[in-house]
Image: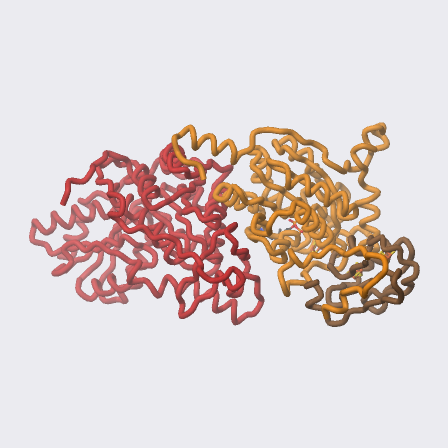
Chain colours: A brown, B red, C orange
Amino acid sequence: MKIAEDLSRVEETEKGDDLPNIVINETYCKGCGICIDFCPTDVLEMRGNLVAVKNLEACTKCQLCDLRCPDFAIQVF
Amino acid sequence: MAEKKKKFMQGNEACSEGAIYAGCRFYAGYPITPSTEIAETLSVRLPKFGGVFMQMEDEIASICAIVGASLGGAKSLTATSGPGFSLMQEGIGFACITEVPCVIVNVMRSGPSTGFPTGPSQSDVMQAKWGTHGDHPAIALTPASVQEIMYETIRAFNLSELYRTPVIILYDEIIGHMREAIALPEPDEIEVVERKKPSCKPEEYKPYASNNGDIAPLAVYGEGYRFHVTGLYHAEDGFPTNNTKLIGEANERIVNKVNKNIDKICINEEFYLDDAEIGVVAYGVSSKSAKFAVKEMRKKGIKAGLLRPKTIWPFPYKAVNKLAKQVKAILVPEMNLGQVYYEVERASRGQCEVKGIFKVDTEAIHPKKIMEEIEKFT
Amino acid sequence: METAATPKKTKKAKQTPFDYSKYIRGGKLPHIWCPGCGHGIVLKSLLRAIDTTGRSNNDFALVSGIGCSSRTPGYVDFNTLHTLHGRALAYATGLKMAKPNLKVIVTTGDGDALAIGGNHFIHTCRRNIDMVIMVYNNYIYGMTSGQFSPTTAQGMIATTSRYGNIESPFDVCKMAEASGATFVARGTAYHYGELEKILYEAIMHKGTAVIDIIDSCPTYYGRFNKFKTPSEMMEKIEKEGTIPLKQAAGLPPEKLQGKLIRGIIYKKERPEYTSEYAKLVEKAGGKSK
Ligand SMILES: Cc1ncc(C[n+]2csc(CCOP(=O)(O)OP(=O)(O)O)c2C)c(N)n1
Ligand code: SF4
Ligand code: SF4
Ligand code: SF4
């Protein structure tokens, strides 16, 4: 993915085969909180001004966070 | 020389024919006296060449549509008069900063505001130069006869393609509506400049790259070169920049690309200038009276001469300055309260007396009035 | 960096995320929009819709006026034109007529399209020229720091309506339909999937397609009108403030009070301008492009 070109730091959480990958582009993330507020299973949280994963196991890969992020900053797969 | 085809036509029709000869294939405009015949003629003529004629909702839409069409590769024209020309100013500035070729005709009428709509005037000369905000390039042509309207329209298209900038044609209601038998140029008789297109790979294309001040080729939308055009100051690649150095350079470049080529853009007619002791600087309809007056003066043995700029912007400072060195006085007859007069005064640098002959009652300046003024200096 | 985004081999095939990189110009992100601004969500829906058409980037032109929403074309890899405040539709019309095969999409704001550009808006709809008009409707002038716009509801606060707006808002869809647009729809940034489908349909439609897209300006509209977060705005304005067409059909008017209808509201076949123009050229004995 070329969007990753600009990444300064990528947080990848990958603990097991069935667990989702949540990739957050910290250069793009503006900390608006939309992804956190709309996550149905409370997977994400704010750390400082940026979003971070707090409970990966709970993620259902619904991609609500991904699709509502205005900044191309979070992807789930 | 073979006998040329002659046709009887009106100034505004000659403008339309000149446009078609130059390869114009898109017209957008809004009806306004005394320019409407251009639209009416082109609504019939353009479709025959597969070209587009559109009557827009206003003059703002018209200037914007012709710039859009030009980016789509069509040589484009709009025509209007005072009130419409005022409305177009922001759009003309956009064409200047984005460097999109297009031609704007302003058939000048009395103003300000609605003024006297059918009354001729020459009072938009300064608006043609300074109408839009910000420092910008200006090319404006001032044909003085029906025949010349045709030739100057072709030249306007050529200049706009060559320098990637809007070109304005200024003439007044009198010549616009005058009928003369004119010679139609044969195909290939007059040079028609085609737009320089890029030859590089699309990834490498920079729509505003200029080496040594040359003019970058302009790609056509939809032909594989996916570039960005914006009225914000932009870098060579066309994307907005807030780098103050680049902004300054870009502004200077768009102005200089015209100023550097003044000698190529400025064309003047000289009439009895060689030994002239009294000069007249006149353009458009007023130059007709001035020419007549000079001829009459010569019959009386008075050494009068006429300098007639066909390009009013950029202003022919050099030619006027040279004339000022030679003559006792320069007279500037114009149908306004003093516009070109001040440019002549500026160019003359105090070397001779400069006197304006102004008239805004919507009647042409009579040659007699010019003759009287010339005689005052003998 | 590439590696970080590539998942390791797995037993189950993983759902791949949408690859926006085909449409985003290299090095142009992050965009200038504020945290939580809805414009980015709308842009993403548009890019997915364009992708579904399977057409090349060369086939699309994105034209805009001036405003936050009008900054969209700068980020995307199409033929892009960022023009004057209110005038996008006029530029787009000229371009479309010169290059009828281009699919022209206009991204414009509520102020850009309906205040300064209102005249162009109604006349473009009237001509039914093939074009998609996306009105990013955030009820405010974002770029100039929050003045009320022609869609701001009565009573709402903006920098120029500190006592509450006294003007009545336009209904973008009603205006488009009355003016002659042949595809009229409403979507929201919140309903990103629905919006993507509407945009796809709009692109496939031949004629003027207007989409009223409700999105949020948390920086001004949100702050002045006491919405605490961008997501709260999305919930209250975009989700609770709208209702799908089908659902609305069965409800009495009282239940629809204060709600905007979502979905494809109006669709009609009517002669399209570029096709009609081609016929005119034939009639005149000329050759069409
Ligand atoms: C002729 C002109 N008048 C005023 C402006 C200032 N201006 C820039 S953007 C804007 C309003 C933008 O609002 P909207 O179209 O709703 O877009 P948003 O920023 O909310 O996305 C205004 C008034 C301008 N650029 N040009
Ligand atoms: S929605 Fe996007 S920009 Fe906003 S906090 Fe989440 S990742 Fe960051
Ligand atoms: S994919 Fe769904 S569940 Fe997983 S973090 Fe995003 S919103 Fe939460
Ligand atoms: S000012 Fe409003 S509309 Fe503009 S980018 Fe910020 S949030 Fe978006």
As drawn, is B179 to the left or to the right of B195?
left
Front residue (pair C28, B173): C28
| Residue C209 image-quadrant placement | top right
Q: Return the residue nearer the eye: A64 or C144.
A: A64
Q: Quadrant of ligand 2?
A: bottom right
Give the tally of numbered discs: 0
Q: Between residues A22 and C216, which one lies in front from this camera angle?
A: A22
* Residue at far front of view: C11
Q: Could you tell me which quadrant the C terminus of chain B lies in?
A: bottom left
Residue C122 placement: quadrant: top right
Res C63 seen here: no
Depicted B131 relative to depicted C194: above or below: below
Residue B90 appears at what percent x and percent y? 49, 51
Horizontal and vertical percent position of residue B72: 48, 48
Quarter placement of the N terminus of chain B = top left
Left or right: A66 as drawn, with respect to B200 = right
Q: In this view, does C20 lie to the left or right of C259?
A: left
Residue at image location 79% in from the left, 48% down from the top: C190
Q: Identify the residue at horizontal 61%, vertical 32% (top origin).
A: C179
At 81% from the left and 50% from the top, the residue drawn is C233
Residue appearing at x 23%, y 35% in the figure: B7
Location of residue B135 in the rendering, given as x and y in whole percent from the top left corner: 45, 61
- Residue A47: x %, y % from top left: 85, 68
Q: Is residue B160 above or below residue C196?
A: below
